[in-house]
Image: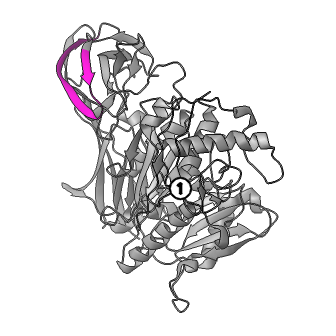
Amino acid sequence: MKRLLTLLILLGLISTAHAGEVGTQRALSIAHRVLGEATRSSDVVVAWDSSIFSSTRVEVVEPTFYVIRPTSGPGFVIVSGDDVVAPVLAYSTTYYAPTMSTLPSNFEAWLRYVDTTVRRAREQGVKQSSATAELWAEEYKPVGAVMLNTARWSQMAPYNYFCPLDNGAYSLTGCTQTAMAVIMKHHRWPESAKGVTEAYTTMYGLPVPARDLNHAYDWDNMLDSYVEGYYTTIQATAVAVLMADLGHAFKAEYTANDTAAMPDMMSLYQNFSYSPASHIVTRGGHSDSYWKSMLRGEIEANRPVFYAGYTSDWAGHAFVIDGVDDNDYFHVNWGWGGVYDGFFLIDNLILGEEYLFDTEHWAVFGMHPLRDGEIDNWISLYSTGLNVEPREFTSGEQFTIRSISYCNFSQLSFKGQMRVGLADLNGEFKSWVSEPFSVDLGVNYASSEQYVSAIINDNIELGDRLYVYYKSNTSEKWFRMRGSVESASDEVIVKYPPIGDNTSLSFDRSSGLVVVEYDDDVKAALYLLSSSVESGVTITRGRMTIDTRCLSPGVYTIYLVREGVEDKRISFQLNRD
């Protein structure tokens, strides 16, 4: 039965604020709030700004970003020079501010991306979105960081002691090898590698010999950081062996100035015993909220993330994401000895769908040690995922699972079984609802199962849900299948809580923003009489933001719909002061 919830809110229509350049004093004020305790006994100053990227000395433009530091002690904040993008782009309370003369290439590439994005936004007259306006209206403070312990390693001595010589100088390890080595150090895995790499010649004519990988790794002697004069030959050798093994296995393009490589996913499995379910996912095609939820899921599963991107000149840059705060800023380990590590905004810089000035990002997901031979996430749900015909379920009554779409993005073909089961509110398995069926799926193939009969014999309780499970022919262990794309449903709620139980609404009079939060499976829309309203409305998963500065006076209705189950309405009246 549909229920109606009406809330009448009288909101004053406030004047529209124009997006524009951010002055030095405003930037300093933002940085001071972010650093908080770190600046209690000191002030903050602009260390430098985007003018370092100016093409000529006579070019005069307002900064696109500011790098701000305390007058004493560690910490830095990178603040946007224009309120068309988010105010806080990066921060650290533990590391010192970057210096212009020692920027690692991957960090510099990120800064150039910020600079280019803001410049183009100004050139094209991009207006501030309601989502960005909400960020500027808040007093940003770091909250609730989850951090994984990772090594602060780099690319030069002692890490490159076994890299090929380039005109008499040791080649750099490369950002790919350093990032992968940091992740392996976190897991302290493998105990030993296996196999022999092939000899090859780089595109620059540097011969790289075959390398025997059949040796153990000395994890106990790999330090979290190496400071010249404070490590032994044994400790230097331990990390240098790992770096060289990865470079040879990935067929790195070695030079003394810059070493490039792509991670070889099959080598990670065959030579280093990491899960063959490890795979590369590109950023394109995923919303910001879904992409961030994927990254957060890896961090919460104790898996540092290998992250990479291409800049406008198609140069590749890799680093490690090893933490996240409650504001969805991700902690970056740049692979430069801990220098400039901090929490960074990794969104498309939120200029609206028509202004995607982003570089091509991608990351490795599911990279974990294959300690017991069991492969989690071998196959995953794809396309629309799990689709069930009824929206109401009764214990003991048969129903039809319309389709299950799935794929294999791993490094190995899969042969095994799939089955649908009932789980409780916390995701704990309760009972099977379908018979098993056989699956034979090659690498990078997708398939689907149609019209599967099912029945729930358990008592149905609030929060119960349907999951799809799989097991391989070589194992007796069942694994839950998860979605590999945003469109793939990986669960069906059997008994929902009412929409109103988890819905909240707030209004900030100073910014004119209305924020409605609700369950992720609920769809939302704003209407004025019978016409839908899109101007000033930003909808993400489980959240609607309404910029009332973009609306004319009138009575508006927010529709919240759980398709085929329930809908609710929240009405408010917007008046002009």
- Residue 542 located left or right of residue 43: left
Nearest the eye: 225 or 363: 225
From this viewpoint, is residue 542 visible? no
Crowdedness near tag 1: few (<14), some (14–19) or many (≥20) residues, C-alpha within 10 Å: many
In the displayed structure, 531 sits above or below 300; it is below
Please, what is the three-letter code of the amino acid marked with disc 1?
Tyr
Nearest the eye: 10 or 380: 380
Nearest the eye: 393 or 67: 67
User: From which residue to which does the magenta span run?
Assistant: 438-456
Give the farthest residue toward the left: 451
How far from the left and from the top, in percent, is residue 423?
39, 17
Q: Residue at x 41, y 20 (%)?
A: 479
In the displayed structure, 346 sits above or below 197; it is below
How far from the left and from the top, in percent, is residue 292?
45, 46
Q: Main secondary structure of the magenta part?
A: strand
User: Quarter-wise, where is residue 88 in the image?
Assistant: bottom right
How far from the left and from the top, in percent, is residue 565?
25, 30
Q: Residue at x 63, y 54 (%)?
A: 155
Q: Which residue is mark 1?
A: 254
Q: Residue at x 53, y 67 (%)?
A: 111
**Is residue 481 magenta-colored?**
no
From this viewpoint, is residue 260 visible? yes
Nearest the eye: 339 or 427: 339
**Is residue 444 magenta-colored?**
yes
Q: Quadrant of the C terminus?
A: bottom left
- Residue 452 located left or right of residue 142: left
How far from the left and from the top, in percent, is residue 399?
19, 16
Q: Secondary structure at mark 1?
A: loop
